[in-house]
Amino acid sequence: MKSLKILSRALLSLAPITALVLSGCGSSGITGVPDTTQGQLNGEVSTPVDTGGGYGAYPLTWKTIGGSAPVASTALRTDSLLKVKVTLDPATHNENTPVYTNYTANYDCATVSITLQVEVNGVYQTLATVVTDRLTAAGTSGCSGSVASQTIDLSAYMFPGHGNVKITAQAVTSNVNCHNYSIGVGSWPYNYGQLCAQNPMQSIYQYHVVNGKLEVQVNGTDFN
């Protein structure tokens, strides 16, 4: 896995978890049978998709706004398998501002922070955060080094006896300014083209909207 950035607290002390460990390798009350627990991001409800030969992963959409908190899924259930496939959709109109809501901060690529929260003794604890590589926005040619999708394997954090899990998404950077420079929108310093060639990414400005999708694979499901 490229660009893996695990927080120093990702492997937090397992002392409070020890009491939850059961005999066998599975989690308490959870099997590998496809579960129908619903998940959502931004209020969109979703269930595993029946692909005919089994169940596909939970398909979720996410939308983050610069300056706002990450968006989180509702509780999902799994045993020992947890993988998250991240893709990027085009921008939509600015939000959370009384002006410029008819403006769309278009980008060709962005990076996204994915955080895993696991329920321990009834309380959700953050165990890991991974920042993706540059993801190509659907319908664009992307930018230097960007990829169509990235799959993050969080299975190592599925310790015996864990509870439900949640996934949060938060856009971190995009190439919105360099996109505008490339199409001749706005005025830019003489060396901006050189700067964009070196690193097109900037932090997400407040009100700018970044969209994408997650597929969350758990025991009993597969990516479509």
Image (cartoon, rainbow, N blue to C red):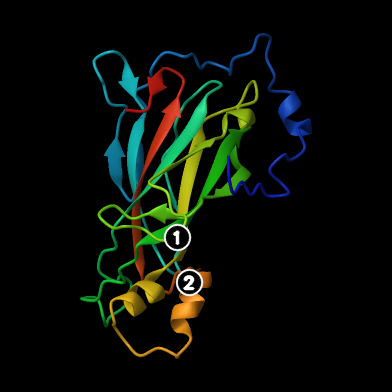
Position of residue 15 in the picture relative to residue 160 (left or right): right
* Residue type at numbered disc 2: Ala
Camera sees residue 60: yes
- Residue at (40% x, 74% y) in the render: 178
In percent of width and height, residue 195 lies at 51, 78
N-terminal of the two: label 2 or label 1? 1
> Residue 144's mark?
1
Mark 2 to mark 1 CA distance (whole Å): 8 Å
What residue appears at the point 64 percent right and 20 percent down from the top-left corner?
Answer: 160
How would you rate the neighbour count of disc 1 (Cα within 10 Å): few for under 14, some for 14-19, many for 20 or more? some
154 shown above or below 144: above
> In the visual, does 161 lie left or right of 82?
right
Which of 167/182 is in front? 182
Q: Nearer the viewer, residue 198 or 117?
A: 198
Residue 197 - label: 2
Q: Secondary structure at mark 2?
A: helix
| Residue 75 lies in quadrant | top left
Which picture quadrant has residue 128?
top right
Q: Quadrant of the N terminus?
A: top right
Q: In the rendering, at what x and y percent does residue 49 appear? A: 27, 26
Q: Amino acid at mark 1?
A: Ser
